[in-house]
Amino acid sequence: QVQLVESGGGLVQAGTSLTLSCAASGIAFSRNAMAWYRQVPGKQREWVAVLSSGGGTTYADSVKDRFAISGDNDKNILYLQIRNVKPEDTGVYYCNAPYRPGPWGQGTQVTVSS
């Protein structure tokens, strides 16, 4: 059974940096792509970054210059580093396996103040 627990969000000031974490169980990063998603009120959840099982990364155009996705295969923890946070980064961030999705976790709220 896949279980995903996101953490690291909070209220942050624009221009600072933030690192989100996703502790995963029941799925092996070494054999599955993992992704971060963001949802804002009134909009569908959208992917922002993908980490392939081979270590390759893909980013949504809106975040590719400031977001960095990485993973620790031994600890099964997925990270999302956000540099120079902007108000438009505000939302609830989730992780999941895009090609083998499990139940969604509770997400971690990021609120950016300008």
Image (tube, helix red, strand yellow):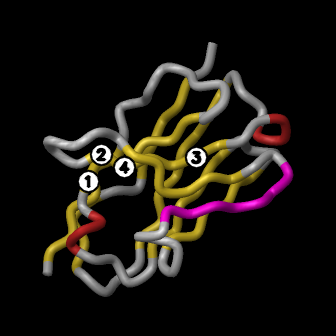
Query: What residue is disc 4 on?
Result: 38
- Asked whether 56 or 81 is in front, the reply is 56
Query: What residue is disc 1 on?
Result: 91
For the residues bearing labels 2 and 4, Cβ distance under 8 angstroms: yes
Marks 2 and 1 sit apart, C-alpha to C-alpha, by: 5 Å
Residue 108: % across, % down: 34, 46
Marks 2 and 4 sit apart, C-alpha to C-alpha, by: 4 Å
Q: Amino acid at mark 4?
A: Arg
Task: Give the side of residue 2 with respect to residue 57, left or right.
Answer: left
Q: Amino acid at mark 1?
A: Gly
Marks 3 and 2 sit apart, C-alpha to C-alpha, by: 13 Å
- Asked whether 80 or 61 is in front, the reply is 61
Q: Earlier in the sequence, mark 4 or mark 1?
A: 4
Query: What residue is disc 3 on?
Result: 35
Q: Let me know if residue 34 is in the magenta part.
A: no
Q: Which residues are magenta?
A: 54-60
